[in-house]
Amino acid sequence: MNIIKKLRPESLRSKSTLAIIITVAVLIEVISAVQYWYAREGIKEAVRHRAESELQVKNLEIQKVMVNVQTAVQNSTWLFEKTLSEPDSICSVLQHLVKQNQSIVGAALIFTADYYPQYGRWFEPYVAKHPDGTMEYKQIGSADHDYLNAEFYLNGLKAGNGYWSEPYYDDSGAKMMLSSYLFPIHDASGQTVALIGADVSLEWLADVINANHIYPSSFNFLLSRLGQVMACPVDTLIMQGNINEITASVHDTTVRQINRQMLGGNRGYNSIRDNAGKKHYVFYAPVEGTNGWSMAVVCSDDEIYRGLRQVGFNLMLLMLIGLALLCYIIYRVARSVRSLQEANAVKERIGSELRIARDIQDSMLPKTFPPFPQRKDIDVFASITPAKEVGGDLYDFFIRDNQFFFCIGDVAGKGVPASLVMAVTRSLFRSVASNHDQPADIVRNINESMTDMNKSEMFVTLFVGVLDLQSGLMHYCNAGHEPPLLVGRGIGHLPVEHNIPVGLMAGWDYIGQEAVIYPLTTIFLYTDGLTEAEDSTHAQFGQQRMAEMARQAVLIDSKTETKSEPDSVIYKSEELVNFMSDAVSRFVGDAEQSDDLTMLAIRYAPHSVT
């Protein structure tokens, strides 16, 4: 009995110790399990970010080539439209287009049926670039090559604003995979009479898609909008069938869901299992600006979590390693929070600097209205509304030798780069206009200065005018800008020459023009942020609506205008700008502003008017 009494406390202590060990073991297992789960989720999130980054990088590489081709074609549109009346000049323009872009291996001007009766129903002049750099010109339109019923031609006409054809393998000539970019050509009446077709080699896609994989066994593939495999590690699958046909033998129905998502232009990721039961992750995203191409990264679950599985058992058995890993995770979380705080601070500083930059930009432009209160012969008002913190629109004006110098411009781009180009352009206008009287000379000098320093290939549409305040004669030069609207006894656009924007090409001979501005006429200048302002349905404000708003403003003004003396015209320009601003605000509604909007109104009211 005494022995039993002596053993009981020891037994109790043993049970207590065992309970503590079990509790500690369970706690360690729980901690290890929790750590394992968090580690797995962390790896999964990291892989997702890496895959998305890889998709984005490859997306940008593809876009760079495609956008260069699109820009080259679109910038050549006006040259093709200019040669419509001179078909013999088409060859030289096509050769110039092909020569200027390494990715373009051939280009054609594809005309509507019977456009040139002397060339027959099919007329498709084509220039091909051979590997040795030589050019070959030929007319390939014929009954055997009936492009009028071809997919690329019909869809190119339907798209109306640029279209990438479905990739195809040219086994008759180029012996390579191609895609064609088509852009409409219009005649003087605005009718589509032809398409520019630029053939682009896609041989470089395989190198872009299969470079720098996340894991050794991961791979990428690229789909066309119809589901054709354009690039992947298995050469025998390229352009050999639709993705749904290729994956038809896979049992996991998630594959079909991913196919639908990719062909629908969506982005995301999902997991699938192959017929052997192995798990894989598929990350996919559309390739912007390619009419429906989509790209995917496929990673093996075994390779992603191989390292984690190797240490999993050790984490469950070794408490110290588990605690160390937990401390490391806490450290990483704390570091992430600190990085986020630093990023927020940087973001706030950048926002403050952008606000300061906007104030500086505003201070560079005339903001005091009326700007010449002592003069009764000229009335000026302007407004500028940037789409971002800083913008790329500009205007300026001053009086020298009883002549009113003025300009308005629009930089091709937005944000900080456009604002810097805007500041340079405005400074050049002030500097050059101080020493030259003719707008064509002013624009020509600005263009030369811009092309010398234009490493970023940004250009500016610009209108420069010089109004003689005594005679009403206005000399002007338009460099690719919207034609001004004359608002007076009637409403109409000022006729302008088709000069190119400044900054595009050195040595361009800009053509000046002149016109007489009648008393009490308002010259209304604007950027395309007005005419291209869109409502929630993507309908544009447009030239016709702008002219109608100007007509309504004149009708309202005529009902209230006094006919006693010229002093009554001082604020007429401001009323027109405010009326137009209210009209576009009502039209746009809650839609987000997509482009800078600038308006400049100049009312000519000489003292002789009674």
Image: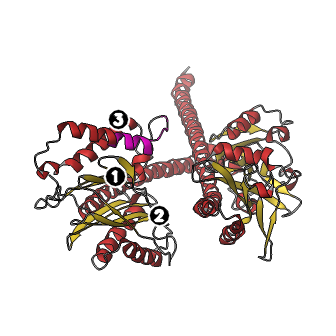
Q: Residue furthest top?
A: 1
Q: Nearer the viewer, mark 2 or mark 3?
A: 2
Q: Position of residue 521 (x, y in %)?
A: 27, 53
N-terminal label among 1 and 2: 1
Mark 1–mark 2 Cα distance, whole angstroms, equals 16 Å
- Queried whether the magenta region covers residue 123, the answer comes back as no
* Dot 3: element: helix
Q: Which residue is mark 2?
A: 497
Q: Position of residue 374 (x, y in %)?
A: 10, 61
Q: Position of residue 487 (x, y in %)?
A: 31, 49
* Dot 1: element: strand
Q: Left or right: where does residue 292 sit relative to residue 390?
A: right
- The residue depicted at 76 percent of the width and 50 percent of the height is 114
Mark 1 crowdedness (10 Å alpha carbons): few <14, some 14-19, many ≥20:
many
Q: As rendered, which of 180 and 13 lies closer to the eye?
A: 180
Quarter location, residue 35? top right
- The span shown in magenta is 537-550
- The residue depicted at 86 percent of the width and 48 percent of the height is 240
N-terminal label among 2 and 3: 2
Q: Quadrant of the N terminus?
A: top right
The answer to whether one can see residue 313 in this image is no
Q: Left or right: where does residue 66 sit relative to residue 494?
A: right
Q: Position of residue 542 (x, y in %)?
A: 45, 43
Quarter location, residue 128? bottom right
* Label ID, residue 586: 3
- The residue depicted at 38 percent of the width and 59 percent of the height is 392
